[in-house]
Image (tube, rainbow, N blue to C red):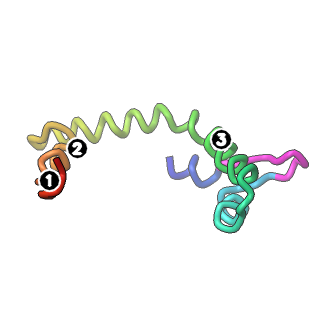
């Protein structure tokens, strides 16, 4: 997944290829143009999401199996057991 995440390419209207680092990272860090930010995020998401979906599903399944093997109800069971602050109802 790291390879997919870091090597994704988003091509703009002029045909220029924008990689996560440095182009898309720079856009996300410096631009205040909503449409440009949306384009960068959506393009990167479209380039990575479909490729990583099955891998991520398998990762979560394996993490949950490991947690169950270790006697946990799931990999977030500890988070459900944290005490609530007194001001939360």
Residue lying furthest right: 14
Q: In the structure shown, which secondary structural element does the residue marked by tag 3 occupy?
A: helix
Q: Name the residue carrying label 2.
A: 75
Q: Name the residue carrying label 3.
A: 47
Q: CA distance from mark 2 to mark 3?
A: 28 Å
Give whichever of discs 2 and 1 has the lower sequence position.
2
Q: CA distance from mark 1 to mark 3?
A: 39 Å
Q: In the structure shown, which secondary structural element does the residue marked by tag 1 occupy?
A: loop
Query: 65 left or right of 31?
Result: left
Instruction: Please tell me whether the stretch drawn in magenta is mainly helix, strand or loop.
Output: loop
Determine the image quadrant of residue 67. top left
Numbered label attached to residue 84: 1
Determine the image quadrant of residue 57. top left
Q: In the structure shown, which secondary structural element does the residue marked by tag 2 occupy?
A: loop
Dot 3: within a 10 Å radius of its alpha carbon, few (fewer than 14), some, or many (20 or more) residues?
some
Which residue is drawn at the image coordinates 74% and 57% (left, top)? 33
Query: 23 left or right of 4?
Result: right
Question: Which range is magenta?
Answer: 8-16
- Decide: is 5 above or below 48: below
Dot 2: within a 10 Å radius of its alpha carbon, few (fewer than 14), some, or many (20 or more) residues?
some
Estimate the x, y position of residue 50 in percent, counting from the top left.
58, 33
- Decide: is 69 above or below 84: above
Estimate the x, y position of residue 65 in percent, counting from the top left.
22, 35
């Amino acid at each position: 997944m790291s390879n997919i995440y870091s090597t994704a390419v988003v091509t703009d209207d002029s045909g220029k290829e924008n990689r996560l680092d440095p182009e898309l990272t720079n856009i996300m860090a410096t631009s205040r143009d909503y449409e440009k930010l949306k384009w960068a995020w959506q393009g990167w998401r479209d380039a990575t999401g479909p490729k990583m979906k099955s891998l991520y599903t398998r990762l979560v399944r394996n993490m949950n199996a490991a947690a169950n093997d270790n006697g946990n109800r799931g990999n977030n069971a500890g988070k459900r057991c944290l005490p609530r602050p007194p001001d939360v109802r």
